[in-house]
Image: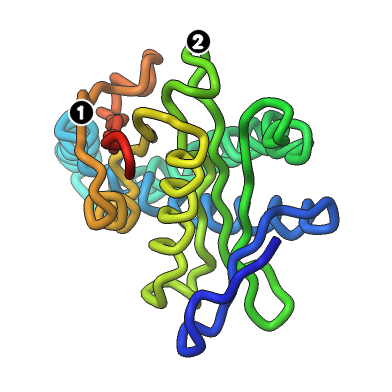
């Protein structure tokens, strides 16, 4: 099923088809890759990282009596850190691609009360979003909005809002009482989009791993309560 989202919008929404799989995976990988440099900046801004780098630089300056060696070591540390973080983020993307995005038709099929949509423009997939029942709540409980991505050159055109509203409409059809989602602190544009759709932030907590706590990588859960009759 497909439907237009206004003539001026320049795109349409439709349900996922098997032939979309590769385009969806590529869009997800490209969208998530944008956060790699943002992650590096976030980590570099952590007080203990800045203190460590500053202390190392000053220690080398005092012992070498020259700026050449300290500058070289500092550059090497930054380059190594950037490379390591890039690899870690790439592992996260590959992990996502090997989970629900490996077989979208099965993970988001009607048999499990789920759905997946794409936004199409000019014959290309420019946006995507999925919705699945929250584990342990069943199809009439809480729906989870997942894998929202909009291609960079189509942001600001209403694609994200249309995808979000498709999820909310689907939740109403399924008789759900709420839609929830989780974002990380690097997704500033996404958080603004969800707030604009009416989602409200709930609890925030660091990623439940040692490294997540170490670099203050916070996850925030958002919720949209559906009133009866919505």
Residue 136 image label: 2
Whether pointer 1 and pointer 2 mark residues with C-beta atoms closer than 8 Å, the reply is: no
- Which is more toward the observer, 89 or 177? 177
Q: Residue at x 53, y 57 (%)?
A: 31
The residue that appears at 35% across and 31% down in the rendered structure is: 178
Return the disc, 1 or 2, that comes first in the chain's sequence: 2
Q: Position of residue 165 (x, y in %)?
A: 41, 55
Which residue ends up furthest to the right in the rendered image? 19
Quadrant of the image for the C terminus? top left
Looking at the rendered structure, the secondary structure element under dot 1 is strand
Classify mark 2: residues with Cα within 10 Å, few (<14), some (14-19) or many (20+).
Answer: few
Residue 205 appears in which quarter of the rendering? top left
In the picture shown, does residue 78 fall above or below 219? below
Q: Residue furthest top?
A: 136
Q: Residue 28, image x and y in percent?
A: 60, 52
Nearer the observer, 68 or 32: 32
The picture quadrant where one finds residue 39 is top left
Residue 136: x %, y % from top left: 50, 10
Q: Quadrant of residue 63?
A: top left
Distance from disc 1 to disc 2, alpha carbons, whole Å, reads: 19 Å
**Residue found farthest to the bottom:** 8
Residue with the mark numbered 1: 202
| Helix, strand or loop at mark 2 | loop
């Amino acid at each position: 099923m497909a439907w237009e989202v206004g003539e001026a919008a320049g795109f349409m929404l439709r349900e996922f088809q098997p032939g979309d799989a590769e385009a969806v995976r590529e869009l997800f990988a490209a969208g998530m890759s944008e956060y790699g440099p943002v992650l590096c900046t976030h980590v570099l801004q952590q007080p203990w990282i800045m203190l460590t780098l500053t202390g190392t630089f000053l220690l080398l300056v005092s012992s070498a009596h020259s700026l050449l060696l300290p500058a070289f070591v500092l550059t090497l540390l930054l380059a190594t850190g950037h490379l390591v973080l890039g690899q870690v983020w790439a592992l996260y993307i590959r992990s996502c691609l090997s989970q629900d995005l490996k077989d979208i038709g099965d993970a988001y099929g009607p048999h499990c009360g789920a759905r997946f949509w794409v936004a199409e423009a000019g014959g290309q997939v420019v946006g995507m979003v999925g919705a699945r029942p929250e584990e342990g709540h069943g199809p009439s409980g809480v729906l989870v909005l997942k894998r929202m991505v909009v291609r960079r050159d189509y942001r600001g055109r209403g694609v994200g809002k249309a995808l979000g509203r498709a999820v909310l409409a689907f939740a109403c059809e399924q008789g759900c009482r709420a839609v929830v989602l989780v974002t990380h602190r690097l997704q500033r544009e996404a958080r603004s989009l969800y707030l604009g759709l009416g989602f409200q932030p709930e609890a925030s907590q660091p990623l439940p791993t040692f490294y997540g706590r170490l670099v203050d990588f916070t996850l925030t859960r958002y919720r949209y309560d559906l009133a009866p009759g919505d």
